[in-house]
Image: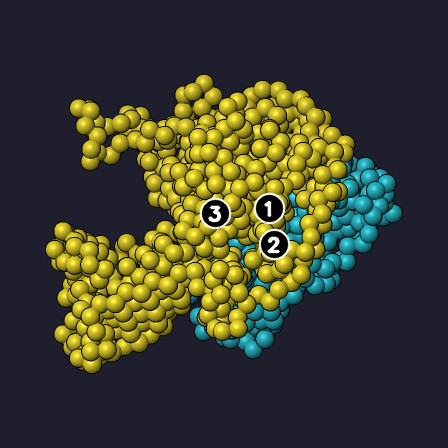
Amino acid sequence: MVDIQLNATINGRNVSRAAKPHLRLLDFLRDDLNLTGNKEGCGAGECGTCSVFVDGVLMKSCLMPVAKAQGAQVDTIESLAKSGEMSVLQKAFHKAGASQCGYCIPGMVMAATAALRANPFADREEIKERLGGNICRCTGYQKIFDAVELARDVQNGRVPATALLETDTADGDVIGKNVRRIDAPSKVSGRLKYAGDMIMPGMLHVQVLRSPHPHARIVSIDTTAALAMEGVESVITSADVPGQDGFGVFVHDQPIMARDKVRYVGEAIAAVAAEDALTAKRAVAAIKIVYEPLPPVFDPDEAMQPGAAIVHDYAPDNITKHIPIRVGDVEAGFAQSDLVIEESYSTQAIEHAYLEPEAGLAYVDHDDVVTVVSPSQNITHHRHMLARIIAKPISKVRFIMSPVGGGFGGKEDMIYQGMLALLAMKTMRPVRLVYTREESIISTAKRHPSRTTLRMGVMKDGRIRALAMRMVCDGGAYGLSTEGVMRKAAILAAGPYAIPNVRIDTYGIYTNNTPSGAFRSFGALQTQFATESQLDIIAERLGMDPFELRRINAMRDGATTHTKQKIGSVSLMRALEATEQASGWEAGAPTVRGPTRGDLNHDDVRPSVTLGTRFTDSANQEAAE
Amino acid sequence: MLICDEYLTPTSLADAFAAMTMHRGRYRVVAGCTDTLPWAREGRAGDVEIPVLIDVSKIPELNERHVGDTRVRLGAATAIQRFLDDAALGRAMPSMPRCAVWFADDQIRAQATLGGNVANASPAADATPCLEAHDAVVELASASGKRSMPLREFITGPGKTQLADGELITGFECDAFPGYGGSFEKVGHRRSLVISVVCLAVMVKLDRDGRTIDDTRLAIAGIRPVPRRLREIEDLLRGKPLTGELLEEAADMPLDLVQSRSRQEYRRDVVRGFLVRGLIAAAKRAGASPDALTRELEAAYG
């Protein structure tokens, strides 16, 4: 390789140093200069958390070869609050609560800075347009736009700078008050270190070999060539696991690397620790694996049929979990009903797409404590599972939760921490693994895809007499959270409604698809989608207001749920009222369109997507037209 | 991951050709890199090892920009964002600023080049229908000389062009259309950073009263292997009074435009709506008389 001798001004300082020719500007800033404020979220120019100024122009540093910065002035998020004093925009993000996980925020602050430089008077629509290259997954865009508008108004003198300060906690009482988040300054300034930002002296870099097959027997793994490569410190497979291998939130059915066979495309089979990520990548490519493909099963309904391919020997029927609920006599309930409606519903797999791809760092400390730092949403459980897997007493295993750059349930699984612990033990050096976006998508859990058949019987006056639901979910290759998701799905399937006769069956099924796991609402979405959709259909058929139908059936204070839980207070009636008002709903059946119908085309309804606000706002472009 | 042993940034055409000759068979030419880097990732090309990358974006000839009253010449390394921040260029190519605002995002446009967009020859490229509407000519150069050809001959299919081994796109020359109103209609799966499912470039010139169509240019992409100029519609509209009926007649011409691999029915609906909406928008920006088009028509296609 021919190094580039890079001379540039970075955050106001002259930098002159050799850089590998294939580096992107982002790699150079983060890895060579340890400026980790700007993050990598996708590596493909989609998310914008890597946005930096190059000669005053905002650029996506993941799309820029470092050579392009030759002679340039580069400013990262670290340049905005250099002496610790935040910029007006950063203070506005702090004030407006425009930081949740914080991972997108450095890029958002940079894009907002660029937007207000381009047009200090930009209105909200133009701000949206100029921030169009930056993605957030958890803060929500409204607070971010609020922050940019606040900063704009402070900068323009329309509101005083005191508007950026805490306002309503004078007496120290913060309960029920709108207070600033105490962790926001670290996020808006890029100072917060996520796992992928952390380094330790002597740290090795980890890359993972993943299965290209959905279902195959592993005949042999040959790591000889990989181990022989200069810079490679260790290569591990399931054969290196000292203890009882297996993790999962409920059933411990997943080895930390595939054992004997692979069950989905993207499953980890081997991991390499090397002096740099490129060497580790090349070593992964040098590992030779002989597979014997097995017949796969991709459809959960097919997986339940006799003769289907068996994913796990312990579950020959491919059922991960079946949750049945029985209340009353549903057949009698249907017989009493004036109207019985049966429909089927399906939902798809969904990726969490947290802005922070999985990352972790592990080391063995001076007291032989195996320590794993990662954005885990479940460190205590991980610690117990890992102790068993690496055959150590619990006192010799430590988990440290790094800031979670978005989780939504997707970081509950111990999907890579085992490999890191094992490599740290093998090498006795710190090891770090940072997933690519693609790796995150291919290997980690998704929302359970579902197929639901729902039968409901109602009286003419709207009272629901019976509900029978059968939902089959694709749990994918491993159990992860499937059992809990099926349980929650079943518990909440009949909604907050008093229904005397209920029969619910939810099934989580093994297939050779990407594993399904925890995702916000944890199964309730799938069943509630069916139940609530069905209520709207019934409202149409009965000619009844859908809010009224729900009120008629609502559980009230002191109700007993379908799973015999006593509920002291039920807020459903208040929630319905608030929703009805906020949506501008005009009473009546869904089929009715009255003259004052306010739920369509009123001021609060978002217009269709368009671009080009800047053409109307900018004098420059007015002239161009 | 894109891996190279050497990254060269020549600052003259002669240096570029010397590097291309020296590394023949083991180099790839890059400019903005906004497509090359995402291409070299899992799911697309994967890890790609290219011995030499030759970055042509710093060559002065490729960054030239001449905007005249009748002709425009743009170096191949012209960044897409220039169509938004160079007012004279926006006037000469009135659909291009509208195209640019839909093109990726502000940050990527600052880096992505016109030459790169054409060299990729994506059926969904946004800039190519605009260039096609301007009868653009592609300028090519190699160590042994220069040649040029119309854009419509240069792009031969999805990802395919007539660029020869050892040759570079140096620039584009095309008609200037000051005084025309321009529009660009685009739909994809979201607003920013999205590949076109359908995109349409429209330019309209009206008479002094804003009632008669003196001239119009239309080109469409995203719905067939290469962009297509809509000369049949231009011929129908030219010289006619501007009315809603005429625009709808144009949109209803049986041209069988949609030859995409997927979602043909959806695209046909979109194309019809885009033709009317694009013509309305371009005519208004060209100074259409306020009573030439009815409010109902604008509402129906807004």
Per the image, the residue denoted by label 2 is A260
Mark-to-mark CA distance, 2 and 1: 9 Å
Could you tell whether A524 is left or right of A34 in the image? left
As drawn, the label of residue A247 is: 3
Q: Is disc 2 in contact with disc 1, using a CB cutoff of under 8 Å?
A: yes
Residue A566 visible: yes
Please tell me which residue is depicted at 29% across the width and 26% down the height of the picture: A165
Q: Callout 2: helix, strand or loop?
A: loop
Callout 3 and callout 2 share a chain: yes
**Amino acid tagged 3:** Phe
- On the image, the x and y values in percent for residue A381 come to 41, 41
Please tell me which residue is depicted at 49% across the width and 26% down the height of the picture: A78
Q: Earlier in the sequence, mark 3 or mark 2?
A: 3
Badge 3: chain ID: A
As drawn, the label of residue A575 is: none
Badge 2: chain ID: A
Q: Colour of chain A?
A: yellow
As drawn, the label of residue A238 is: 1
**The chain drawn cyan is chain what?**
B
Crowd band around label 2 with a 10 angstrom C-alpha radius: few (<14), some (14–19), many (20+): some
The answer to whether residue A35 is above or below residue B236 is above
Residue A359 visible: no
- On the image, the x and y values in percent for residue A486 come to 36, 59
Q: Earlier in the sequence, mark 2 or mark 1?
A: 1
